[in-house]
Amino acid sequence: MAAAKGSMKMVNKEGESGHPCLVPLCSVKLCDVTFLSFKYMSLLSLTSHWVDRESTFTPRSALLHANEFRGSHTGTSIAEAIEEMLVKWKIPKSNVHVVLRDNASNMKKAMDEMDVASLGCFAHTLQLVVHEGLLSQRSVSDALANCRKIVGHFKHSPLATTCLEDIQKDLQMPTKRLHQDVATRWNSTYYMVESLLEQKRSISAYGADHDLPVTLTSYQWALLEKIIIVLAPFEELTRQISSSTSSAAEVIPSVTVLKRLLARESEGDTGIKTMKTTLLEAVQKRFKNIENEPLYAVATLLDPRFKDRYFTGADSNKHAKDALTQEVEMEAALLSRTTPEGAETVPENPHKAPRLEAQPDSSSSRKSSLKGLFEEILQEHDEERGASSTSTQVQNQIQTYLTEQTVPRSDSPFQYWGVNQIHFLHPGCHCCKVSLCSLYQC
């Protein structure tokens, strides 16, 4: 809770009535609602995310509320609890751009009853896709069942674990324990298989002198090598979308790249073709309408790393641009009504901010299995791009932005808009929407 308290100090301020209020109130646009269930207690938390426009579009977040949730977890009771939180922090529902929630039906119903926009958890949906794929092929499910038995043998026997560690030292291998596959832990199957493949020599040596509940055949070891290759993109995307800097803008590009990767056939698919086909079908089914969701579509367009390059259909691309045009025009109209005549609405920012490069993950030596596909799609789109006829001033400004080259994926979209907001129409509201769309975290 120390980190949470520190975050609250940044935004907590006593209001006139003695209740806490959020500063700046007008900037709060995303709420993250989370359920934490323990053995004897359930907690409902509310986290606010916004952009600090006074410091070059710096993303901020703060845990505002975390209370024990008693009683039945119905959509109505959850909606009432969340509304009480918003009232306590003096946040009008009109100031909440979107609520990020889990995929449970009661949470979706709660958002519907509150009449606020919401998005489900992308990472959780990815795990449901993986689950379908792993169960689709008997040879794969049998191999994984044997893996669980082997890992369970060492997890339940301190003596067996000690013997395995001694063997690892004798073979001059890193002393590591095997990862257990837990249904509620994301990517745990991937990490289990990865750890077994890494310790294949030591496990084989252990099995030569000790009893194991099962042993893996040569075919199953080879099958595990192929499974890990197929699951690697899902693990990579889950890590990326779960990071503190991720945004809703990454969802559509990730799905597009994932579908292209799974659709490609190779000689190494022997033995896992059914699994790979099922994964592709599951992705297509669960993300069927993702490009037609305005929240995701506008967020993707306004991320300078992606823009309109990753939409797979002409209709969805057009609908996304229409939604963006409508948003900009609405914000511009609102700005013109609320800004005094002659007031300055464009913050001066003559100094270009330094490029923010993504730091390598020191905890993992894995190579990206998706980087090449992201760049491949960008290159194809640049070759196909032609002139587009537009009429209104807003459409011209949007087209100017979209025809510019995308920035590297390692760059920060926040820094981009902090620097470039003065170059586009109505940046006071336009870029505000840009940053807010980049703040949908999962």
Image (tube, rainbow, N blue to C red):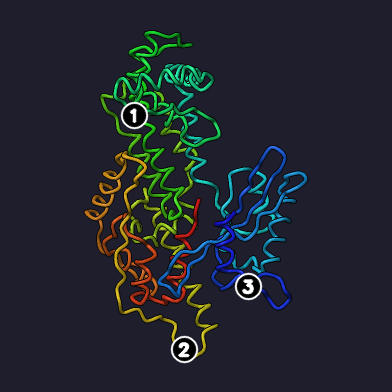
Q: Residue tagged by mark 1?
A: 174
Going by the numbered disc 1, the residue's amino acid type is Pro
Query: Dot 1: within a 10 Å radius of its alpha carbon, few (fewer than 14), some, or many (20 or more) residues?
Result: few
Quarter of the image containing the N terminus?
Answer: bottom right
Query: Dot 3: within a 10 Å radius of its alpha carbon, few (fewer than 14), some, or many (20 or more) residues?
Result: some
Which marked residue is nearer to the observer: mark 2 or mark 3?
3
Does residue 50 appear left or right of residue 280 in this picture? right
- From mark 3 to mark 1, how far is it between C-alphas? 51 Å
Residue 234 or 172: which is nearer the viewer?
172
Image position, residue 94 (x, y; %): 62, 68
Q: Residue at x 28, y 56 (%)?
A: 408
Q: Secondary structure at mark 3?
A: strand
Q: Residue tagged by mark 3?
A: 13
Q: Residue tagged by mark 2?
A: 343
- From mark 2 to mark 3, how far is it between C-alphas? 28 Å
Q: Residue at x 69, y 45 (%)?
A: 42
